[in-house]
Amino acid sequence: MANIRVAIVGYGNLGKSVEKLIGQQPDMELAGVFSRRDALDTLDPATPVLPVAEFGEHTDKFDVAVLCLGSATDIPEQAPEFIRHANTVDTYDNHRDIPRHRAEMDRVARENGTVAIVSTGWDPGMFSLNRTIGQALLPGGQQQTFWGPGLSQGHSDAVRRVAGVKKGVQYTIPSPEALEAARKGESGLSGKQAHLRRCFIVADEADHERIENEIRTMPDYFVGYEVEVNFIDEATFDAEHTGMPHGGHVITAGDTGGYVQSIEYNLDLDRNPDFTGAVALAYARAAHRLREAGQAGAYTVLEVAPYLISPTPLEELIARDV
Amino acid sequence: MANIRVAIVGYGNLGKSVEKLIGQQPDMELAGVFSRRDALDTLDPATPVLPVAEFGEHTDKFDVAVLCLGSATDIPEQAPEFIRHANTVDTYDNHRDIPRHRAEMDRVARENGTVAIVSTGWDPGMFSLNRTIGQALLPGGQQQTFWGPGLSQGHSDAVRRVAGVKKGVQYTIPSPEALEAARKGESGLSGKQAHLRRCFIVADEADHERIENEIRTMPDYFVGYEVEVNFIDEATFDAEHTGMPHGGHVITAGDTGGYVQSIEYNLDLDRNPDFTGAVALAYARAAHRLREAGQAGAYTVLEVAPYLISPTPLEELIARDV
C-alpha cells in the first residue's frame, strides 16, 4: 500500500511537531510544507516548501493537508478555501464556534467531494471523545474536565505584560481536592476552585511585592483563583521553565444504584504541540481513508470510527487490541 | 422519538445490572427478559418474562437484545441463533476467539439484515478502544494494560477450592512501581511483576500455615506473583469482601523526539457487572441506530462512531462536548 502523502500548512510550533511526527508514522510521508514564507528551516532540507497562495495548484502531490494554523483568525478565514481543493485536518479550538465551523466546512467539502476532520487535538479532540463516551455510559453522572498541570500561554502572556517582569510563566494546576471529589462523583467544586495558578517570575527584588500584587488582582485571569507567585533567578528559569508541558483530566463518575463507577482519562504531556500534532496526524489518516471510501463532508472526532485512525489493519486490531 | 425497546437475554449478575440501568437511560425501555426459567424476581414485577426458546417469536416486541450470557459456552453457541432474529449486543470476553466470533456473527447478521455489536464491556470494550487509540496516536510508544484493584472471580474460585477455606476472595492489584514505569514509557515490568495478588481468607487457625502455602504454590494462578494472604474473621469478611469491585488502567507512553507523552485511561468500579452492563447498553443504542440506518453485520467497539452510543443528538454533542 502506498504511503499517505501529508502536506503541512503553516510552520509554527504545531507545523514543526507534525513534520517530526510524520517520520514516526509507518504509513506516511511528508509531501511538502505550505507557507507564506519563501524559505523555511525544515528538518529535511529537501522538503518542498510551497507558497500557500498556490495550495490549489499542488493537490496532485498530497492526499491530506494538516492545517497548522491559529484558531483566532487563520482557520475560520482560510480553512474553507483549503477544503475546496483537498482533504484537511484542523485543530480549531474556539469551542463555542465549532458548530459553525463544522457546518461551513461540511458545506464546502460536500460541494467539492473532499473530507475535513475539524477540531482534532486534545481539547477539543481526545477530551471531547472522552466527555461524550463518559456521559453515554453514565448518563446521570457528574463530569468534570481539569486542565494541567500545564503551561497556559494566555496567562503567561498576561503576567509578562506586568511592568518589571523580565521573564514569566504561569502553570495551571488542578486542585487535588477537586480531582478527588470528581472521582467520587461529588459536584460542587467549580472552575475557579478546581484549579490553582502557579507563576514563576524573573524580576528585580525591589519590584517583587508590587508585581505579586498586580498579578493577584488581575481580573478574569487571576482574581478568584488560588494563586502562587514564585520569584526565581534567570538561570533557573531558563533551565526549568522554557518547555511546553500540558495535560489534564476528564473525569466522569456516576451512581449505578448505590455503586460509584468512575472513569478517568488523563494526559501528561511533555510537549503540548507534539501531542496536538500526533492527534491531528492520526485523524489525517482517517480523512484520507474516508475520502477513499467515497465519503465527503466534515466530521468531528465523535463521528469517526476509531479504527480509522490506526495504521494497523482492522483485522489485526481486532486480534490484538479487542 | 419512540424509546428504544431493549430485551435482556439471561438473568444473572449482568442481566440484573442491565435491567437496573435501563431505568437510568432517557431513551430506553425494558421490553422483557428472556430466560430458561419460568419465573424471575425482576425489579418490576410487571416485566414480561419470556422463554428463551421462543426468542424468535417475540421480535416485534423489542429493537435490540442484550445477551447477558457467559462467554465460556453460552455466547459462542447461542449468539449466532439470536442474531438471526434481532439486533444483539454481547460482552464476549474470550479475547483469542473474538475474531472468529465477530466473523461468525457478521456472516449471520448480513444474511438476516441485523446488527450485532460484539465484545462490549470494559475489557474487551472500553480498554480495547483505548489500546487502539493510544497506539494510533503514539505508534512507537509503550503500552500496558493493568487490571485492578479488583476482585478476580477465577482466582477467588481457586482459593476457595483449597481444603479448609470457608470463605475466600482474591483481589488483583497493579504494582505502583509498574504503573509509574508505564507512565514514563519504560518497558520491562511484565504481567507477573506488574500485579500483586491479595487474598482474604476465613479458616480455622490450625489450617492457616498449610492454606497459605497451598495458595502461594498454586501453579498458573499464584506462582511467580507477589502474593499476600490475610486471614480474617467471618464477620469482617461478610462486611467488607462480598462486593464486586474492579477496574484497571490502559497506559500508553511514547517519545515524540525527546519528549514523553503519556495517556492513561482508568476505571475504578464499585460494581463490575454494572459497568459492563452500562457499556453494553450504550452500544445497544448504537446497534439499533446502525440497523435503522440500513446497516447489517457485526461490529466491534473499534468500528462504531462514538456519537452513536450517546443519548444526546449529534448537534448537541458538538455544541456541548467538542
Image (cartoon, coloured by chain):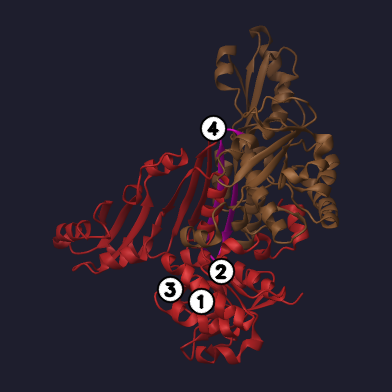
Chain colours: A brown, B red
Could you give the CA–CA distance between mark 3 and mark 4, rounded to whole angstroms?
43 Å
The answer to whether residue A305 is above or below residue A119 is: below
Region in magenta: A250-272
First in sequence, mark 4 or 1: give its number.
Answer: 1
Inspect the image, locate mark 2, and give the three-letter code of the amino acid beneath it. Answer: Ala
Q: Quadrant of residue A192?
A: top right
Q: Quadrant of residue B221?
A: bottom left
Q: Which residue is denoted by mark 3 in the rendering? A: B71
First in sequence, mark 3 or 1: give its number.
Answer: 3
In the rendered structure, the answer to whether residue A30 lies left or right of residue A84 reads left
Q: Quadrant of residue A253?
A: bottom right
Q: Which residue is denoted by mark 1 in the rendering? A: B104
- For residue B257, the mark is 4
Inspect the image, locate mark 1, and give the three-letter code of the amino acid beneath it. Answer: Glu
**A140, B180: nearer the viewer:** B180
Q: Which is more foreground, mark 3 or mark 4? A: 4
- Residue B229, magenta (yes or no): no
